[in-house]
């Protein structure tokens, strides 16, 4: 369970990207505090800036204004204390599952663990995601869900302070996705991990999160609303389907996304093609 101590903090974060003929304001004044052990989801329409927020926390992008603090220290570059799991597994295709995890483990624990300790630690993390039986297989010998499990094992094996997940289950079929969501809830409960996860899936957000951070549409996107999810853990997806609190949370997110923040797409000028539609065009239409 989470404590009240601030752990990860985004303060007054703005992000501007240089584009042809000027700058594009992707984020404006994003403020967020995440406590240790908390599971936070970021949700919002495509292009609103979720990955930009995650990349700033990961240290892959530097905010134009404001910044990110982890345990009071400013994040200025990527580091193993902030492991990222992407939508596509990003495993080395020529290495086995074991060796893929080993690569990350060696980077972090080369000095503090013996070779034998590292072997046991790698096996333990692969067991956590139920991949102990396939440690010696290469990515092309694994299913999509199994590859994603290895990616999660690799991230967990680095013992990160924060686990950052960018639509980790987005490319998986519904059943595999459900199995992995259950595994993630189990692991998070066991390790008390702090997780920031991007998702487009409202049910996934409600099932997994302690809080759901809903982002407004860009340009100059920011946090629109933050919804606490007051559901007891462990959570059971079947039982939750009939739970009034679960359905209330679902409806709040759906209302935000489809009533308060309808998806807007730029409207091309008369006589111009698709390329005229830029994210900074003021004339926009709301999709019905
Ligand atoms: N390097 C860049 N240069 C210019 N514009 C960028 C750059 N990176 C992102 N953007 C713009 O910033 C906005 C936010 O992008 P971002 O990828 O963070 O959105 P997102 O919410 O993660 O989208 P999706 O859900 O589709 O993955 C978009 O309008 C995007 O076009």
Image (cartoon, helix red, strand yellow):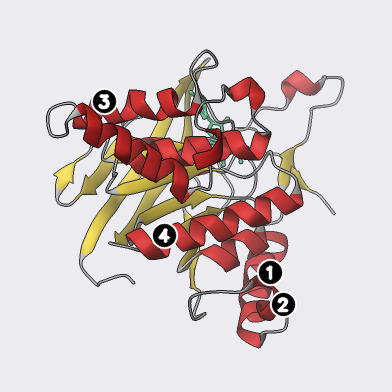
Cα gap from disc 4 to disc 1, whole angstroms:
28 Å
- The residue furthest bottom is 244
Ranked by sequence position, the earlier of labels 2 and 3 is 3
Ranked by sequence position, the earlier of labels 2 and 1 is 2
User: In the visual, does 171 lie left or right of 229?
Assistant: right
Q: Is mark 2 within 8 Å of ligand 1?
A: no
> Badge 1, how many Cα within 10 Å: few under 14, some, many 20+?
few
Tags 2 and 1 touching, CB below 8 Å: no
Tags 3 and 4 touching, CB below 8 Å: no
Eye-nearest disc, 4 or 1: 4
- Image point (39%, 44%), residue name: 125
Q: Is residue 51 at least partly visible in the picture?
A: no
Q: Quadrant of ligand 1?
A: top right
Q: Which residue is mark 2?
A: 241
Q: Which residue is mark 3?
A: 106
> Badge 3, how many Cα within 10 Å: few under 14, some, many 20+?
some
């Amino acid at each position: 369970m989470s404590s009240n101590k601030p752990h990860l903090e985004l303060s007054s974060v703005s992000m501007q990207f240089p584009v042809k003929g000027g700058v594009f304001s992707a984020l404006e004044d994003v403020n967020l505090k995440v406590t240790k052990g908390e599971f936070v989801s970021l949700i919002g329409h495509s292009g609103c800036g979720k990955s930009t927020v995650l990349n700033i926390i990961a240290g892959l992008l530097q905010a134009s204004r404001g910044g990110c603090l982890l345990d009071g220290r400013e994040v200025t570059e990527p580091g193993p204390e902030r492991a990222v799991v992407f939508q596509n597994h990003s495993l080395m295709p020529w290495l086995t599952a074991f060796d893929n995890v080993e690569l990350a483990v060696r980077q972090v624990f080369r000095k503090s663990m013996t070779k034998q300790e590292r072997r046991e630690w790698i096996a333990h993390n692969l067991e956590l995601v139920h991949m102990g039986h396939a440690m010696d297989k290469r990515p092309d010998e694994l299913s999509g869900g199994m590859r994603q499990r290895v990616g999660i094992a690799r991230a967990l094996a680095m013992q990160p302070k924060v686990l950052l997940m960018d639509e980790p289950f987005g490319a998986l079929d519904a059943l595999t996705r459900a199995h992995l969501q259950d595994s993630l809830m189990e692991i998070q409960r066991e390790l008390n991990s702090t997780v920031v996860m991007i998702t487009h899936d409202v049910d996934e957000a409600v099932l997994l999160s302690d809080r759901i951070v809903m982002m407004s549409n860009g340009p100059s996107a920011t946090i629109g609303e933050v919804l606490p999810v007051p559901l007891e853990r462990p959570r059971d997806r079947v039982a939750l389907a009939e739970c009034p609190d679960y359905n209330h949370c679902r409806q709040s997110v759906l209302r935000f996304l489809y009533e308060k923040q309808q998806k807007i797409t730029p409207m091309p000028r008369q006589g111009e093609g698709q390329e005229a539609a830029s994210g900074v065009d003021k004339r926009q239409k709301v999709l019905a």
